Image (tube, rainbow, N blue to C red):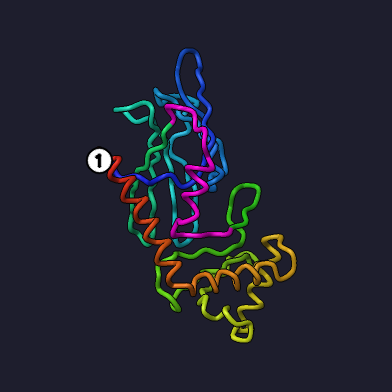
Amino acid sequence: MPGAEKEHVMVCVQIQIDGRNGVMLADPGYHVPRIITVMADGAYPHTGWFTQMDEPHCRKEYNYTFNQDNPGYVEWQERETRGGIVKCQISLVFVGKPYQDAVNVTERRNLVYNFRSLLSRDQKGHLRAGMYFPIGGRGVEEQFTLFFEEGPEKRKTKYKFSSFISTKDIPESALEDIKLCNVQLNYKPDELLEIICKLANVMADESFIEQMLKINDDICRAGFDAQRD
């Protein structure tokens, strides 16, 4: 069964309703703006399928159910529709024992994760503004996506990190976009620009990025090997 390695921490509370077992999941680390109820029998108040994101370019739907072979795991089913193409993925959430070491397992693992995001959401969990980027070891070609609300629409723009290594190379249009995004992130003046400039220097260190990606690959490989065993 395909799955994802440990990326973040969610909260799980075991519940029992009239002798029926279940769990309640809170997953703000993955930007799920609701409490999810998973009942072993699939009956009320089981959450079932729900729409996590519905935007013109992409629709994501999630479903959480107990694994039929091992009730110590909850299956997280994801259905993504993009451009008429539907992609499905199943991951496993271990709920059989207490999770007692978030720092050693999750926080350290995230240090070398190869996708980064900095996001602002409204009270309903909808994206407002932020930036995101993959880390692919492409050197000067590495880029990030900046997005923010512009009236009723969202505006997205891609910029190369290499343009931010020296402040004199930053396009004026990029500075304007960053200022608007900075406000919607509720940051101090120029705070987002400072973050991006620091990231640009990190991304330019090819030796560091290569080592980081290798560690990430080793973790992923170990996780998949453990699932097969």
Asked if the magenta segment contains residue 107, the reply would be yes
Secondary element at tag 1: helix
Give residue 65's quadrant in the image: top left
- Mark 1 is on which residue type? Arg
Depth check: give the residue in front, 194 or 111. 111
Residue drawn 63% across the image and 86% down it: 168
How far from the left and from the top, in percent, is residue 147?
Answer: 57, 67
Label 1 neighbourhood size at 10 Å, few (<14), some (14-19), many (20+)?
few
Q: Name the residue under label 1.
A: 228
Q: Is residue 136 above or below residue 102?
A: below
Among the 4 quarters of the image, the one containing residue 142: bottom left
Q: Which residue is drawn at 44% across and 67% down?
A: 209
| Residue stretch in magenta | 95-118
157 to the left or right of 21: right
Quadrant (top left, top right, bottom left, bottom right) of the N terminus: top left
Q: Give the answer, above or below, for where 63 lies relative to 187.
A: above
Q: Which of 103 and 80 is in front in this view?
A: 103
Residue 125's x, y, as percent? 59, 49
> Which residue is found at the position 30% from the left and 40% from the top?
226
Residue lying farthest right?
Answer: 189
Relative to the observer, which residue lies in front, 86 or 144? 144
In the displayed image of the protein, which residue is found farthest to the bottom? 168
- Quarter of the image for the C terminus: give it: top left
